[in-house]
Image (cartoon, grey):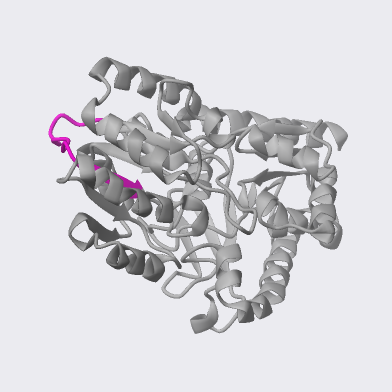
Amino acid sequence: MLVLASTFPRWRDDPEPGFVFELARRLTTRFNVLALVPSAPGALPRERMDGIEVIRFRYAPRSLETLVNDGGIITNLRRARWKLLLVPCFVISQAWLAVRLLRRRNIDFVHAHWLIPQGLIAAFVGFWAGRRRPFVVTSHGADLYALRGKALNALKRLVIRRAAATTVVSSAMLDELGRIGASIANVQVRPMGVDLSGRFVPSPTVVRTPNEILFVGRLVEKKGLSVLLSAMPQILCSHPSAHLTIAGFGPEEDVRRAQVKSLGLNAHVSFIGAVMQPDLPDVYRRAAVFVAPFVHANSGDREGLGLVAVEAAGCGCPVVVSDLEAIRDVFSEGQARFVRPGVVSALADAICTVLDSPPSADAIENVRESLRQKFDWSIVAEGYASLLESLVQVEVGQQ
């Protein structure tokens, strides 16, 4: 299996999102997995990570390979328009190396993460390589919601038509595919997963605080941190000892620090930066409440699924989350406290309610078990493995 992706760990315990890697490494028991992903300063050009052969393609001088990390491609392009110059070389380099690998290796199929550009690359490299291979394309959200316009929508529809199968990580994304005129007959909803059996589990050795509010995520507009910060003065009126911990990094950090200062919240807000994956569960375990105040960004981007809230709930932390379409794939009514996106007073009231009356241990365990049955990596990876194996069987039958 050849995996094409843009977001992938640069090294072990990289704080960048690791869901593509986590899925791929769990498929190594069924497939020989080769990942073709972008290079980055400090990353090895080739290595083996947990059974995955990783090849990182160069697309610019080392110091300029900054298109992907610290916010993602779309965010980085909006922050620095000059990085548009990196896109053609990025796409051509990944496509060219994919062709070479398809010619030289005995690759049966391709799994492309994101409709554009990886899905587009997968749709055409088979022709250039001399023999078409079936491919599955997975959309994670930003590629579907934030990349807009007639031309881009036409490319998305083309990718879906040519794919042997398409997966999206939430049912809300099916509606968006329908809106842009794509056929959803061959589209399946298959989320990414969370390690709810080993890593993101409660621990009796970590004491949960009565007043710590937790935010974990990239510091980008769609995560809604600005709304949570605006809610803090109201929260402090009834909970003067409340403290907000912000774990994450991203392009909005300076703006959010300035917001904290302007609101006079310096004593009540801590920016702790990126947290390594092995350390993240304890951050969830000690918080009184986890808040995911997602919003629709002005660009149209929005959360594709919100697995960070699953991580928190897996560690036994109560969750307050924006009532977006995708989040309803995660939590049922009563499993989390829902609030209208972007409504400061509603968010503050919901957080105060949880601080005043935390859910019972039985309620938390019921939520954990429900999430485990849907999102534990053992279940998610098995679903993807079955889908990918069906492609191989079809391919063999046609030969």
Give the percent coordinates (x, y) of residue 72. 54, 62
**Measured from the top left, where is residue 387 in percent x and y?**
67, 31
Q: Is residue 393 left or right of residue 75?
A: right
Q: Nearer the viewer, residue 203 or 331?
A: 331
Quadrant where the image shows the C terminus = top right
Taking the spot 28% from the left edge, 30% from the top edge, the residue there is 354
**Relative vertical location of residue 311 with respect to residue 294 in this rendering, above or below:** above
Magenta-colored span: 202-215
List x then y, in percent, for residue 42.
41, 73
Q: Quadrant of residue 146?
A: bottom right
**Residue 221 magenta:** no
**308 lies above or below 36:** above
**Camera-side residue of 69 and 10:** 69
Residue at horizontal 53%, vertical 45%? 24
Residue 261 in the image: x percent, y percent? 28, 67
Q: Residue at x 59, y 40 (%)?
A: 31
State which quadrant residue 94 falls in.
Answer: bottom right
Number of numbered discs present? 0
**362 left or right, relative to 333:** left
Q: Main secondary structure of the magenta part?
A: loop
**Can residue 345 be seen in this snapshot?**
yes
* Residue 317 visible in the displayed image: no
Is 213 included in the stretch rendered in magenta?
A: yes
Identify whether 141 is placed above or below 64. Answer: above
Residue drawn 45% across the image and 31% down it: 338
Query: In the shown orientation, is residue 72 left or right of residue 287?
Result: right
Left or right placement of residue 57 versus residue 346 in this view: right
